[in-house]
Structures are given as C-alpha cells and as structure tokens.
Image: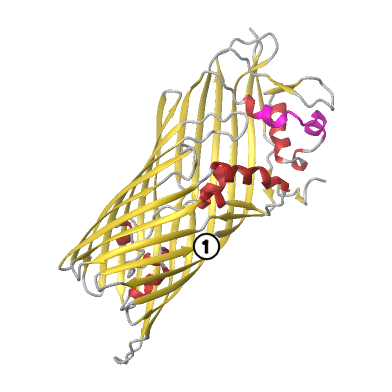
Amino acid sequence: MKKIFFLIITGLTVSASYSQEVSDAMRYAQDNLTGTARFRAMSGAFGAVGGDLSAISVNPAGSAIFNNNQVGVTLSNQNIKNNSDYFGTQTSDKKNSFILNQAGGIFVFKDRNPNNRGWNKIAIGASYENTNNFDNNVFSAGTNPTNSISNYFLAYANGIPLGDITGIDYRDQFYNEQQAYFGYYGFVINPVANNDNNTQYTSNVPAGGNYYHENEIYARGYNSKLSFNIATSYNDRIYLGANLNVHVTDYRRSTSFYEDNSNPLVSTETISNLRFNNDLYTYGNGFSFQLGAIAKVTEEFRVGLAYESNTWYELYDELSQSISTTRQASGGPELYKTVNPNIVNVYDSYTLQTPGKVTFSAAYVFGKSGLISVDYAIKDYSNTKYKPTSDAGFRGVNSDLSNQLTNNGELRVGAEYKIKQLSLRGGYRFEGSPYKNGTTIGDLNSYSAGLGYNFGATKLDLAYSYLERKSNQGFFSQGFTDGANITSKLNNVSLTLLFEL
C-alpha cells in the first residue's frame, strides 16, 4: 500500500506525499506589515522607538519603554486589486475584507525607590497580530500562442507505467500518478502504446494554433502570531527584551483553469476545451523567538538591534481536484467527460522552516514634539527549507529554494510630529525581491500616513497605507509554467483604540 491509512466512510484519503512548491514556502516566509494604526502610519519603523504595542513585533525590548500599563485593539479594512496582463490581455479583480488586525496589552512593574538607578523596570505583555491576510482574488485571461495545459499532464505522466494509472485506485496513488490519472481519464493525453508497460504519452489537444486561457484564483485565510513578551531596563538607558511567538496559519485556495482552442480538429476525437479545478487547504502552527536591545546613546538618539529566529511550522495539506473536458471529432458531435473522484487527499504533516531576520534601527526623538526613525532588516530567503531535509520528496524543492531565492533587505522610515494632543505621522517602506530573478515576486514599495489624538487615558489612532508589488508566477509548476504579469495594489485603513491603565 502506498498510503499510510485511509478513511472510506468520509470520502477522505490520507496520502504520503504532496508536491510542495517554492511558492507554497514563500506564502509563509513573507509577512505583511500589520499592527497598530500608529505602527502602520510610520511604516513599522519602530525598532529603536518602542512604546507601542506592535513595536515588540520588531524589537521585544520596546515594551520596556512604556511607563504605564496599556491595552489596545486594532481593526482594519483591506482592499487589494490585482491587474493582470496575460499575453497582452488586460484583466483585473479585487477583494475587500475587514479583519481584527491586532490586540494586546503591556503591564509595567517599576521600582518606586528613586535611589535605585539599576534594573528598575520590568514589562510583561502579550500581543496578537494578523501577520498576513490571505484574502485575495486574481483573474487572468488571454490567448497563449504556443502552449497548452496538456503539457502539464504530460510532464507528470511521462515515465509512469500505464498500469499504475489504470490499475491502482485513485486514493492509493501518489500525487504525480493522480495528475496523470486526470490527464488520461479526461482524454487530455493518450498512451503511445495501449499496454500496462507503456510509459510515454502524447497530447490529445490539437496543435498548430492559439489557446485561450482563463485562470481564476480565490484565496482566503490568515497567518497570525501570538507573542508573549518580557523586557527590562537598566537606568532607563539600556533596554533588553525577548518574545516567544506562536504562529497559526489557515489557508484555503480554489483555482480554476480553463482552456479553449481554435486549432483544427483531427479525425480522431480531440479536446476542444477543458476546465481543471484545484482546492487546497493548508493549516498548522509554528514557533519562533525574538531577542532585542535598545540603547539611549543620548536623551535624543537611540539605536536598536533585534534578532528573530527561524519559524518552524508543522503544516497539513488537504487537496481535491477535478477535470471536465469536451471532445469533438472533425464534423462530429461534442462529447463531455467529467473526472471527479470526490475524494479529499489528506497528506502527512511536514515541517517548513522559514528564515530568520536581523533588524538594525536608529531613532532621533525631539523631546515631546516628535521623532524620526529608520529600520533596516536583512532576511535570507534561501535558508527556507522543507524538513526532514533527508526526505527524498523534499530534495528537489529544497534545491529550488536554495537556487531561486536570495538574501534581501527591507528599509522602513517613519516620522511623527505632535501638536499638543494631536499627532501627525508618515512613513515609507521598501522591500527587495526575495527571488534572484527579481520578477517572480518583485520589489515592494509602500507609503503610509496617519494621525492620532490623545484624550488622556484613551488614545485613538487612524492610519492609511498603500502598497504596490509586481509578480509573475506560473499557473502550474511543471510542464505548463506560463503565467500572467500581476500588479497588486493594496489599500489598508486601520483604526486603533488604546487605554492606559
């Protein structure tokens, strides 16, 4: 048996392997900028500033800057629009969502003895943040002059004996055999020889013309982080802190790929159009830790250094697939075929290690009138790995991760100016591409602004941020790797309510 075990009654099947990709790893290796409205308005440049509930997500020493207990909650509205260009055809789609972006509290314990100038403060806190909102819609359409999705099925099928495709139950097949199964029973590919030992296949999609394609992606879910923080200060000049982080991910993606060709039909039955559907559900949790320090060089000038460890995820994948095809002989009637096993593949758990990060920070505080802050973070995405690395199923994708990804930098600049109880804020963020080619996922540019009002024991903050990034990821990872050029534009409005206790 190729399965560990299987459940027949529920229609679920448990499979030993699934074809992880570089893009799957990058989904969890990258974090979006989230947090309180003040944090977002200044583009997250808080590594040497502290004193904000989300500052501890950059530098855990930042909680020791607080002088009073504080609790708060942040709500956000996110609108993302994706403009697609596929072989010159322009399309667009968008998704709007409301989320609980952040919630947390910091509690400060100070030595009341005015003569104690040593370790005189301890801060303890907890913070929840939605580090990545996966709600997203992408629609691409256009005419491909050369390639058909049949190449995807051929890439998996070639080398697999026909007997393994037809003689092994779908629920007992490996992932590559299942892809060949859909191609064969959907009549997209044909064996060169009709015997069990055949390992070569040809396309049943007529060649010599254009292929009209539509690709729909509907994603939902989140990546969240719950941080438990402790920090202390020495003589109000040196601040040290640490975080223990629990990560939770819940991701659902439905894709539907449609192909219609206007190529001349041959005398035998050939594919005139098809639709291939995939529904993926990934869920799991992870762990990481952070260490940080902030030093007041002078009363105005501060520097910070923070380290965030690798994140170790334990993830689970569930996948269901189906295909519908239309066949037509030259001058003959249309014949319809749907292949839907009605089975959800539930795969064995696996470990994903995402890269750590080092952040250098500096800030200049103009007394009580405002501040300017700069953060620079370094992250080596090529250290992303599926584990165990000795697993033969992970060797190929781990090699791709090492070869395709690179070390990148992230620059965050923020400023704040106070007019009595009113605060005006702005920021800029740049993040380089994590890919060596610079195009699979391109550079990120983001601008932000906001304001806040201090009512005394209550504070209200509002922020707006705009982000733009280009990408070009293939619709499929093998055989048919053509994809659209996507320009993603994200608008976010966040509102934070804070209480000092």
Report the front residue among 177 and 25: 25
Residue 45's spot in the image, x, y percent? 33, 59
Residue 233's spot in the image, x, y percent? 37, 79
Crowd tier of the residue under label 1, counting other residues whose Cα lies within 10 Å: few below 14, some 14–19, many 20 or above: some
Quarter placement of the C terminus: bottom left
Residue 241, placed above or below residue 474 = below
Question: Was residue 215 drawn as part of the magenta stretch in this picture?
Answer: no
Q: Is residue 345 visible?
A: no
Left or right position of 268 against 52: right
Amino acid under label 1?
Ser
Residue 450, placed above or below residue 104 = above
Report the front residue among 290 and 152: 290
- Residue 126 sits in quarter: bottom left
Question: Was residue 165 drawn as part of the magenta stretch in this picture?
Answer: yes
Residue 164, placed above or below residue 120 = above
- Residue 181 sits in quarter: top right
Q: Is residue 414 visible?
A: yes
Report the front residue among 73 and 429: 429
Q: Which residue is mark 1?
A: 309
Residue 91's spot in the image, x, y percent? 41, 29
Left or right position of 156 against 307: right
Look at the magenta stretch and give its main secondary structure. helix
SS class of the residue under badge 1? Answer: loop
Residue 290, placed above or below residue 207 = below
Please provide the residue range marked out in magenta. 153-167
For this orientation, the residue located farthest to the left is 420
Count the numbered circles shown.
1
